[in-house]
């Protein structure tokens, strides 16, 4: 059996250091909220739709509360108060605010127990709907059988949701287990979630509730025909992280790209904003039974995949620790890594094998997510197809949870129909060819793969302990992650972070904490 | 001028053999195969042979084919616009700038508008560069400012004006629906409107960008796939030295 012999003391130290890093944020999680969190609460209360010029109603209401200095108590309090005073539902309150017929902060606040009485059934109903989605998914997996390991994950990215549906259905029939609808390139920095079905995007398709619904319905149809549950994933990241998580929970997405630090490092989103948003987003994902996936592959596309391999491990451990704080179980943590070593390097395959095995061994119960070669993929599609085969070989050999298939046209365009099909054929061939090979292989304790994995782990531990000593924000400000400096009070979205009033109330966060035992 | 005609080569000179791969919205059967073959005939190929056929589902089929073309290209008539400045390594460029320009060159770069993919601009500008070639930040002779992703054209130009830049570098990776052409055109139009176009070099880069396209769009140079910091730095140094 192909098995690493990891230094147990190092494993323990790595988790202790990660817990020290993430445990230092109680002041932030208990004291602050963000406009994205408040918009999420409103969406979960049933507020949907947009104004004529396309501004979503959750944004209208939250902006209204910011303008009238009411946001610090939490958006739910004001909306419920208006529902009570005016005998309206949440949606009607939002519409009246949009029509400037209602100023929420001008209504006298009712007693807390009266507000709670209105709020509780709303919270309960929404959670019931999310729970029903979770149960339906579990039922389908029980009926059709579990997802294959590694699961075949492919992307669609035409910009047009209806065209995406055709490509997704074709891929699912060929054997894809998970369909990701790549988002339009600028969406992560939009401070709102666009409304309705969309047919134009750049490098991807906008994530909207309606697009989620359209794709889910299409995949449910194929699932029933193929007798295989086809999972759907999107991106709970960027400035609307918790809102997208909520929409995914409501529309039964099954996975979400959801990283605790990606937005800070690679999209220059404010550190406080990101950590707060991920804290709430992950509670929603946890309750919805959504498998999160993290974005460690990005460290390797910006830095050397051998020298900086430890940054992947360090980030995985921090992501794991933050996820646990939000109630996500290890079996729903798709911690990420990638196959990005320069193919010109001698023994690159041995390095990749060591790194992939390290991830799988450190997180044995997690459906770890393995990303394909991208940095050294070129216009030579034949070479890239071969690199993808080597990547698929390692994926099966080391039992990765999710194999994000490489496309031979990776460096050229978003995949054409045939590109995706060839990628699936490639994966299926390798997965079958080396299915049980790992049972017949052994690693000596002093083998290169074993030594290398322990070396990366040791570097990660030393790095994490240093970060734990100086604090995550300080380390980020100094550029110790991904060689990018991110100061605590810099980046986009800082103006959407606010201090909570002592009477702040977020009904969903309270209920979720209770449900998740946090 | 003497003609110099060439045809695709399989294993015999002038056999015209080409390898083709495409998908059609047809069924994966004898009917679909014939449709693919007829398509190749209509394209002017002779002896089309469908060697592979794969069902893509949802009514689509993928074909792999070989065919011969009778078309030849006269290489005597081929003209390409390429960046014609010699390529120097970092040390040579630094020495060249010191000798011929005598001050630091300021370069401002960004991925503009909706483009969030910094791989290209980072490979050229960031300290560590790409594939054993350091980025412009590492050059002693360059003051390189990388503004990162999703930078509005206006902000890039404002920064270039503020720093009195010698060159503006623009990267465009996303090309769906020709968004890169729109973005690059917008930037150059703004630069002209603001009177900056003639004051500095405008250079663009990305996987779908060629020098020829860049010239057509009104830029001084364009760098496509396979270009390195050394190509860009040498071009800037030589071109500025010519104007000194």
Image (cartoon, coloured by chain):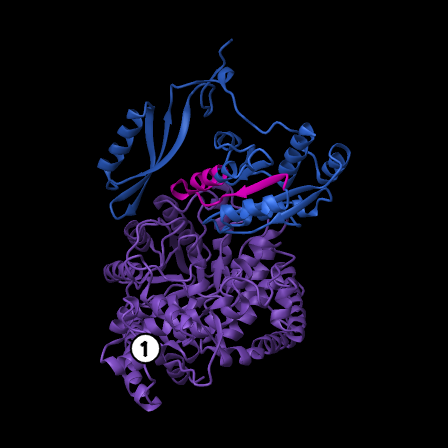
Does residue B178 show up magenta in the picture? yes
Q: Nearer the viewer, residue A34 or A511?
A: A34
Place of residue B6 in the rendered image (x, y in percent of width and height, measured from the top left): 47, 18
Residue labelled with disc 1: A79
Q: Nearer the viewer, residue A45 or A323?
A: A45
**Callout 1: 10 Å neighbours few (<14), some, many (20+)?**
many
Chain B: what color? blue
Q: Is residue A55 magenta?
A: no
Q: Quadrant of residue A94?
A: bottom left
**Which chain is indicated by disc 1?**
A
Looking at the picture, tell me which residue is in the foreground, B5 or A400: B5
For numbered disc 1, what is the local secondary structure? helix
Tell me the shade of chain A: purple
| Residue numbers of the magenta segment | B165-189
Considering only vertical position in the picture, is A372 above or below A497? above
The reply, left or right, for residue B68 in relation to residue B82 is left
Residue B150 appears left or right of A204: right
Q: Who's the residue at 30% across and 53% down the image?
A: A198
Q: Please tell me whether residue B179 is drawn above or below residue A482 in the rendered image.
A: above
Q: Quadrant of residue A40?
A: bottom left
Q: Is residue A368 among the parts visible in the rendering?
A: yes
């Amino acid at each position: 059996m192909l098995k690493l012999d990891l230094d147990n003391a190092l494993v323990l130290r790595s988790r202790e250091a990660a817990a020290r890093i993430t445990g230092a944020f109680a002041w932030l999680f208990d004291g602050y909220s963000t406009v994205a969190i408040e918009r999420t609460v409103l969406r979960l209360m049933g507020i949907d739709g947009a104004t004529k010029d396309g501004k979503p109603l959750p944004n209208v209401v939250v902006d209204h509360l910011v303008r009238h200095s009411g946001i610090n108590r939490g958006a739910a309090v004001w909306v419920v108060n208006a529902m009570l005073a005016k005998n309206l539902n949440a949606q009607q309150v939002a519409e009246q605010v949009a029509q400037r017929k209602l100023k929420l902060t001008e209504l006298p606040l009712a007693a807390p127990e009266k507000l709670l009485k209105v709020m509780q059934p709303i919270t309960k109903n929404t959670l019931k709907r999310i729970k029903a989605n979770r149960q339906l998914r579990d039922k389908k997996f029980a009926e059709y059988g579990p997802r294959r390991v590694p699961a075949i994950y492919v992307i669609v990215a035409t910009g047009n949701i209806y065209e995406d549906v055709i490509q997704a259905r074709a891929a699912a029939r060929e054997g894809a287990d998970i369909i990701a609808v790549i988002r339009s390139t600028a969406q992560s920095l939009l401070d709102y979630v666009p409304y309705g079905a969309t047919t134009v995007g750049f490098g991807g398709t906008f994530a909207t509730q309606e697009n989620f619904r359209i794709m889910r319905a299409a995949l449910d149809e194929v699932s029933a025909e193929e007798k295989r549950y086809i999972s759907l994933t999107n991106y709970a990241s960027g400035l609307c992280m918790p809102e997208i998580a909520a929409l995914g929970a409501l529309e039964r997405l099954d996975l979400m790209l959801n990283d605790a630090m990606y937005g800070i490092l690679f999209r220059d989103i404010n550190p406080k904003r990101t950590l707060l948003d991920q804290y709430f987003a992950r509670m929603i994902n946890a309750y919805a039974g959504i498998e999160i996936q993290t974005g460690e592959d990005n460290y390797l596309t910006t830095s050397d995949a051998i020298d900086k391999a430890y940054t992947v491990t360090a980030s995985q451990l921090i992501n794991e620790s933050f996820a646990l704080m939000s109630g996500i179980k290890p079996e729903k943590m798709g911690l990420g890594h990638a196959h990005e070593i320069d193919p010109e390097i001698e023994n690159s395959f041995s390095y990749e094998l060591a790194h992939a095995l390290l991830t799988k061994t450190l997180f044995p119960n997690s459906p770890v997510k393995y990303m394909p070669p991208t940095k050294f993929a070129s216009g030579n599609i034949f070479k890239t197809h071969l690199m993808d085969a080597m990547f698929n070989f390692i994926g099966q050999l080391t039992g990765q949870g999710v194999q994000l298939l490489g496309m031979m046209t990776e460096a050229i365009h978003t995949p054409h129909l045939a590109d995706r099909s060839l990628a699936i054929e490639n994966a299926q061939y390798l997965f079958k060819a080396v299915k049980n090979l790992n049972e017949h292989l052994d690693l000596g304790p002093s083998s290169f793969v074993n030594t290398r994995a322990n070396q990366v782990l040791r570097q990660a531990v030393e790095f994490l302990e240093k970060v734990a000593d100086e604090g995550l924000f300080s380390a980020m400000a100094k550029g110790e992650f991904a060689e990018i400096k991110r100061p605590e009070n810099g980046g986009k979205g800082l103006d959407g972070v606010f201090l909570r009033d002592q009477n702040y109330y977020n009904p969903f966060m309270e209920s979720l904490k209770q449900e998740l035992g946090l | 001028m003497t003609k110099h005609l060439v045809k695709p080569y399989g294993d015999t000179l002038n056999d015209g053999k080409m390898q083709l791969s495409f998908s059609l919205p047809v069924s994966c059967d004898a009917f679909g195969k014939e449709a693919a073959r007829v398509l190749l005939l209509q394209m002017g190929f002779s002896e089309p042979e469908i060697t592979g056929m794969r069902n893509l589902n949802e009514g689509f089929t993928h074909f792999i084919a070989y065919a011969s073309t009778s078309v030849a290209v006269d290489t005597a008539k081929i003209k390409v616009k390429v960046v014609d400045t010699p390529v120097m390594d970092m040390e040579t460029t630094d020495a060249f700038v010191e000798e011929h320009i005598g001050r630091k060159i300021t370069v401002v770069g960004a991925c503009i508008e909706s483009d969030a993919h910094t791989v290209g601009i980072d490979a050229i500008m960031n300290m560590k560069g790409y594939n054993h070639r350091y980025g412009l930040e590492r050059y002693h002779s360059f003051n390189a400012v990388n503004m990162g992703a999703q930078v509005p054209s206006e902000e890039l130009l404002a920064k270039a004006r503020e720093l009195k830049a010698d060159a503006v570098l623009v990267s465009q990776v996303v090309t769906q629906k020709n968004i890169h052409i729109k973005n690059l055109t917008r930037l150059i139009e703004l630069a002209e409107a603001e009177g900056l176009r003639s004051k500095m070099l405008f250079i663009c880069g990305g996987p779908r960008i060629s020098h020829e396209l860049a010239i057509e769009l009104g830029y001084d140079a364009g760098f496509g796939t396979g270009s390195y910091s050394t190509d860009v730095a040498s071009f800037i140094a030589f071109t500025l030295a010519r104007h000194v």
